[in-house]
Amino acid sequence: MMIEPLNSKKLKMVGVGAGGHCRVLLDICYQRGAYDVVALTDHNETLHGQCWEGIDVVGSDAELPRLFAEGITNAFVGVGSVGDQSLRKKLYDSLGQQGFQMPALIHPATTIARNVDFANGVQVMAGAVINPNVKIACNAIINTAAVIEHDCVISNHVHISPRAVLGGGVKIGEGAHIGIGATIREGIQIGKGSTVAAGAVVIKDVEANDVVMGVPAKSKL
């Protein structure tokens, strides 16, 4: 996945979802200087007609076909997640089906090794550190100041929360959520759809759809 260079020719973009997560992404677009966000959409009718960071919330997602026809063919999912990634996945899939391109949005204040593999729609916030041979799949979030050590594999629609730390060779299953400040020991596998609570220290594999918390982390299901 190519990442637009800093200060390249700006490409027009629409953001889907006008909340706090969207504000962070708007700042990334501004900081990189590569994208011109010209419109936002949101299902919340009370936001329609408002202006966020200078960008108009033009209506619901029903406006997306019109915007695409007008030549705005790049988009980002501006909805965050806490535990449940289903809405982000739904929006990402819908945008793809409509033909939108979803480039990786990478804050310039990150430390990223040369051979990191980013897929479509990946979002990396300020202060993140991503070390060599990491693979990050579609629509994943690497949030503020998270650390991803060498050889990790992060699947589709995963959220790595602020200041979470993944040791080398960790594998995160699709749709999993790693909470704020969690630590995952090297070589651990986190199952699909699972949740690691904030501050947890994971020293053994986590099953699919499990919820673990504590030091050391234990299942709460």
Image (cartoon, helix red, strand yellow):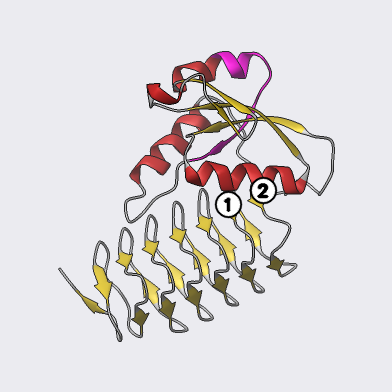
Is residue 120 visible in the rendered structure shown here? no
Q: Is residue 190 left or right of residue 142?
A: left
Residue appearing at x 24%, y 67% in the figure? 211
Report which residue position mark 1 lands on: 123
Q: Which residues are magenta?
A: 66-78
For residue 69, above or below residue 52: above
Closer-to-camera residue (218/134): 218
Q: Position of residue 69 (x, y in %)?
A: 62, 14
Q: Residue at x 60, y 39 (%)?
A: 102
Residue pictured at 34% horizontal, 44% vertical: 86
Q: Residue 113 colored magenta?
A: no
Q: Based on the displayed image, in which of its 4 quarters is residue 216 positioned?
A: bottom left
Could you classify mark 1 by the number of other residues whose Cα lies within 10 Å: few (under 14), some (14-19), or many (20 or more)?
many
Label annotation for residue 28: 2
Residue type of the residue flagged with mark 2: Ile
Q: Amino acid at mark 1?
A: Gln
In the rendered view, does 7 fall on the left or right side of 146?
Answer: right
Task: Give the residue displayed 43% in from the left and 84% down from the top.
Answer: 185
- 81 or 191: nearer the eye? 81
